[in-house]
Image (cartoon, helix red, strand yellow):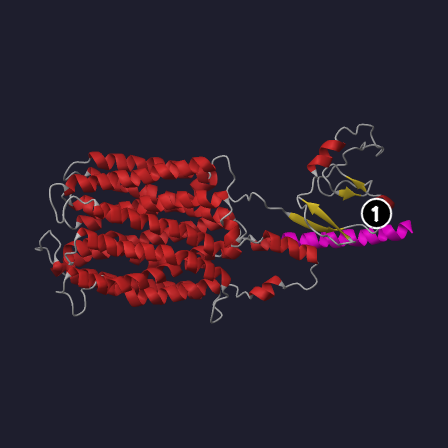
Amino acid sequence: METSKRDTEDNQSSSTKSDSSGTNNEISNHSRKLQCTIKFSYGVGHVLNDLTASMWFSYLLVFLHQVNNFNNMLAGNLMLIGQVSDALFTPFIGFESDRTSGFWKLGRRKSWHLLGTICVMASFPFLFSECITCSHAPNIAQFVYYAPFVVIFQFGWAATQISHLSFSSDITPCAHERVSLQSIRNVFTILANLSIYGIFFLLFYLEGGHGVNDDLSQQDAPKFQHLSLISIGIGVLTNIIFHLGTKEKVTNRENQTNSNPNESSIEKSAVMHSKMNWKDWLKQKQFYQIALLYMATRLYINVSQVYFPMYVTEPLQLTKSSIALLPLVSYVSSFVMSMVSPYLNRYLGRKPSFVLAAVIGLGSCTWMYFIEKKSDQVYAAACLLGLAGSLLLITSLSMTSDLIANNTESGAFVFGAMSFTDKLANGVAVLLIQYFHPCEGCCPACEPYYRNVQVFVPGGALVIALIALCSLIPQTIGLRGHTAVVQVMESPVGTHEEAGFEQCSCGQFYLPPNSCSACGFMPGYNRQDLARTVDDSDDDYYAQERKPLLTRANINTPTRDLKVL
């Protein structure tokens, strides 16, 4: 009888080891490095959004003010409509992207990415073109004309952004690989912005010649239109590369839930318990902390990008070619930082990297306050602006991926919620800045106003970001407050005592004279004769340490043990 039990246990032990080995191999294969072609294809998948966002934030107000002659409130309200629309669309798109299974066998993320691409293509060129048949109509009539295109564009932009961000969490579970993907994505973001400013700089001279006035006017409208069409052409090409170069698993939600019919009910319960939906995220404290940090990061980047051309042309009184050249300098420095940021995140960590970026950003804001008219110091300040923005964005996105961890089933909702706070804050900020503008057109009061906007709004956003980061310092990002990690393992036949098993202080059962398979030791036994020692002082301690985390569960598994880690 004893021999039979030993044979049964040996078979079960070898089966458990085999299962463990298979699991380890599966994890190893799942965590391996992604191919360079996949990384490249992923990186270019957001270029269309980057090109259009660069024009939206850098040149929309310039186009509306100085080409279409919109007043401050109308221009600000049009941008507010776009930002609020984006803010409302992002959580909806995130929820639907997690819930649906996609179409045309593309997968849920790539399906929404394609839908967003189509919407951006169909709407964006109209935003930087003169009103068709109504170019001489009152501003309010042109406002009504542009508003629907703004809403369609923002829906498409949000669909592309959320699906692309969440795809990075789906494609690999490795934290370092996710940082690498975000860095590559940011590299192409910078290249996209560089191309916008470079092409725009060339358009002024190839189309306008060298004898043009230094002030923008309605005669410059074709330059904005041509730039928008070039952006759409480049972006569509890169999105095609993204769809051809990456693969997404097409999952059926019912099949995913019932994929293994031989799985026991306790195994299925453990899997389902680890999943999180949007309601679970709203109960997580870190969800709000990361959202505040991400919102402040985006506020710093976007406001400094929107009003940098105004800062260049009004307080510093530089030529209109500078609104293309100075952002170009800023994005070159961003490109350099994007190459360095993965190493900073790996060796310094997320939080120290973010602090470093915030210090650089605050330094650039302080410097901009003291720069005088026509000064070349603005080039160095623009360089610091680019360094800070790149490192802040990569680190905050990596923190968001850390927050999601393995709960990729609802990753799109998380990124959508983060983007909701970002877009809403930016829209409100731009509206308030336009509302408190001291005059309708250009006047002497504009010079200190745009200087203060460029300095204090981004600087204040960085202070908010640092406060949010301080609240995260004692916490491990991604560690849930009420998550139980459950391991199901085979039990010996009959009771442990009948089969001759002993329980190690770590909680694992082992068969003397073998050592514990979990920790390699046999606490409570001499190494020479395996005799039980008289010291049982640690029994109460380990009994408390092994207190189960699952207190409300009906477990009916006669041949299995449930180990709570």
Q: Residue 216 or 191: which is nearer the viewer?
A: 216
Which secondary structure lies at badge 1? loop
The residue lying at 35 percent from left, 60 percent from top is 157
Tell me if residue 161 can be seen.
no
The residue lying at 86 percent from left, 51 percent from top is 5
Q: Can you say which quadrant of the picture contains the C terminus? A: top right
**Magenta span main SS:** helix
Q: Residue furthest right?
A: 1
Image height of 161 relative to 333, above or below:
below
On screen, residue 225 versus residue 101, left or right, reads left
Q: Is residue 241 magenta?
A: no
On the image, the x and y values in percent for residue 242 come to 41, 62
Q: Which residues are magenta?
A: 1-25
Q: Residue 559 or 92: which is nearer the viewer?
A: 92
Callout 1 amino acid = Thr
On screen, residue 64 versus residue 54, left or right, reads left
Q: Residue 7 or 542: which is nearer the viewer?
A: 542
On the image, the x and y values in percent for residue 320 come to 15, 50
Residue bearing the label numbered 1: 495
